Amino acid sequence: MSTKMIYGASLAALLAAAGPAFAEDDAPALQDVVVVTGQSNSTETETQMTPDYLPLEGPDITHLLARTPGGARIGNGALSGQVQYRGLFGERLNLRVDGQRFASGGPGLMDPVFHYAPAPLIAQVVIDRGVSPVSAGPGLAGGSDAVFKRVDFSDDAEPTLGYDLSFSTRSVDSSYAGGGVIGLSTDSWRVNVIGSTEQGEDFEFADGTVGGSEYQRDVYGLSAGYRTGAHTFSFDMRRQNTGKSGNPPFPMDIQFFDTDFARAGYEGDFDSFDVKASLNYIDVAHLMDNYTLRQDPPPDRQRYTYAYATTLGGDLSVSFAHFGGVMEVGLDGETVEHDVTIYNPNNANFFVTPMPDIEESRVGVFAEWTGFTRGVNAQFGLRVDDYSTEAGTAVTGPALPMAPQMLASMFNMADPGADETTVDAVARFWTEEINGFTWRGTIARKNQVPNYVQRYGWLPLTASGGLADGNIYVGDLDLDPETAWIFEAGFDYFGQSFYARPTLFLRDVQDYIQGVPYDDTIGVADSMVEMVAGMSGDPTPLRFANTDARLYGLDLDFGYDFDGPWRVDGVFSYVRGERTDIDDNLYRVAPPNLTLAATYEQADWSASFEVRGVAEQSDVSLTNSEQETGAYAIANFYGDWTIRDGVHLSFGIENLFDEVYRDHLSGYNRNAESDVALGERVPGAGRSAFVRIGIVG
């Protein structure tokens, strides 16, 4: 199947030849589907896929999403990368793993959502184009769901063996990864086990080694299902153990994440309506410190932090025919508990709870209609969410100075409770294909409530929910939710040889939560917060506050299929993020970038030469003391070979000319045991060769 024939055609080095799988009630204009591993099966609601490959730029699937239109990667560590989509990242995006929404374990977001999506276990990533539908849950902007591999029901009463495995190695960090799924299924039951193991050393670049960039991660689990008539029951559970893994842009590194996932689901097809329901449980235990993977600070400055997060959630929805389309109504929610405690390993009397016993709960209801009206396809959605948060008592050990103890007393005397209600509305339109064109547009109002760090961070710390800008922050109990008005317009064009999918977008965000100077007397320690921050080396702390912001831009993918074996594909992304309450820019927004790939393709093999060019980023945040970055370009080579049915080999060399480059989103180095100077941006990986083999049956 040629790239020009499929919806979601993208960069040749990303999708060599793939047809995304859409259910009959899905709308291609609203989603992208990126297939991570080769698929050999097909059903009535799928398009058969030939095996594809992705560049092996690292273990984090955020590298993959960064290659899609509007996508970028926040590089906070090999296993701590965050997705940026059209300038927004972190909890503002509606990210799910196998359909589950959950709270990350640490206040620094060392375990963002896709930390829990190892590439060897992921079958595909479904991207919500532009904005997420209200049925997928709350969120300020777009989102995506990383779907795990599993052995599906077969068409036979006799058990059938199925498996999907991959094994890879990469030179730049001497890393390896392996894993997948293997199981049995019939037409009425299925059961499979999953497992993966990954490990890498500090990665290299032309001028040396990036210290403290090693990683290790293991996952194992079980998935089962039972089908009787029109009713399907499922159960999934898995355990993830992340070991010592470096985070050069952070003041601490991961010592472990021990995380348990459990999910029970039901789908039923009744005469006049369909029902979906699930219950979810996620428990995260996390330890980080500032001395195991980096140069030891003085004994009185050594710290380790325990953090916990538990999420219990569920959802129920009913779909039925209505007004010539499909109406879905539903109820969902979750309860989340957080706790964070900081210790000094050399002093039993030094401990403090900067985010003590935080409890967050949400209950949401939604209605979403998808169908054909007034000559166009449309989706209309309305969601109402009710939030409630509470905090426990801040505790300090007797070894802490008097100033932080006084701040703890002030926090304990305040009213830490908060209750908010948000209303989201989404209207999306797209036409039928007319002469190769599908026109589309979106108008939406979306909300995001403050996270627990932004609201309850009473102690001045560098913990900032993954911003990693080096600033010290405190929270604000009186923060309001962010509200974004979103407008998008574009088209998908597929001709005989050429395709293009451009989108223009605008997001106007009221009450955007951003760090601002703590008070008007910047640099003068005339408050307790500034005094405590000064003890940690930053006399100019920031506090989270409601501001106003605007993001706008253009992104597209495009390509041309020549007569014969050659084709060219490309992805372009441009986003501008700015404060509208003052003259400043938003922090850590990706610069304009363009990727072009020329591919030579035969029936069972292909080869691609790719060039990625990134412009300078001079539109930086003065408030966050953000440094500008220069332009750069790197070249890559990728090969792909289907050895035989079910066996697929991919290989490549990335950064062919061993360029030293610094991505604007890579963060500033804070690990002294490195060939990168303190405060300098972490460079990209040097020349690297990789090999991966996939086996499907």
Image (tube, rainbow, N blue to C red):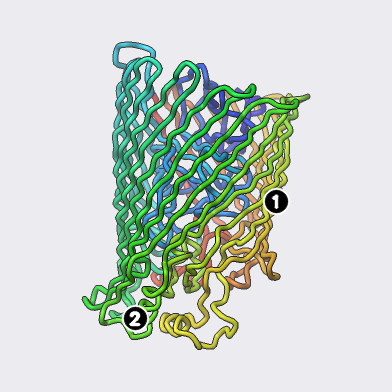
Q: Residue at x 66, y 51 (%)?
A: 485
**Circle 2 sits on which residue?**
405
Asked whether residue 350 appears in the rendered view, the answer is yes
Structural crowding at the residue carrying mark 1, measured as other residues with C-alpha within 10 Å and reported as few (<14), some (14–19) or many (≥20): many
Q: Farthest left residue?
A: 348
Tell me if residue 188 comes above or below residue 242 in the rendering.
above
Could you tell whether 228 is left or right of 555 in the image? left
Count of labels in the image = 2
Residue 115 lies, in percent from the top left, at 41, 49
Quadrant holding the C terminus: top left
Residue 647 lies, in percent from the top left, at 42, 26
Residue 282 lies, in percent from the top left, at 33, 46
Tell me if residue 669 comes above or below residue 165 in the rendering.
below
Tell me if residue 186 comes above or below residue 266 in the rendering.
above
Using the image as rendered, state which of residue 205 and residue 621 is in the foreground. Answer: 621
Tell me if residue 658 comes above or below residue 289 in the rendering.
above
Which element is circle 2 on? helix
**Residue type, mark 1 in image:** Leu
Quadrant holding the N terminus: top right
Residue 244, by quadrant, is bottom left
Using the image as rendered, state which of residue 164 and residue 414 is in the foreground. Answer: 414
**Residue type, mark 2 in image:** Gln
Q: CA distance from mark 2 to mark 1?
A: 45 Å
Structural crowding at the residue carrying mark 2, measured as other residues with C-alpha within 10 Å and reported as few (<14), some (14–19) or many (≥20): some
Q: Which mark is residue 506?
A: 1
Q: Residue at x 47, y 69 (%)?
A: 475
Residue 34 lies, in percent from the top left, at 53, 35
Evaluate if marks 2 and 1 touch, with contact meaning CB atoms under 8 Å apart.
Answer: no
Residue 3, by quadrant, is top right
| Mark 2 or mark 1: whose residue is earlier in sequence | 2
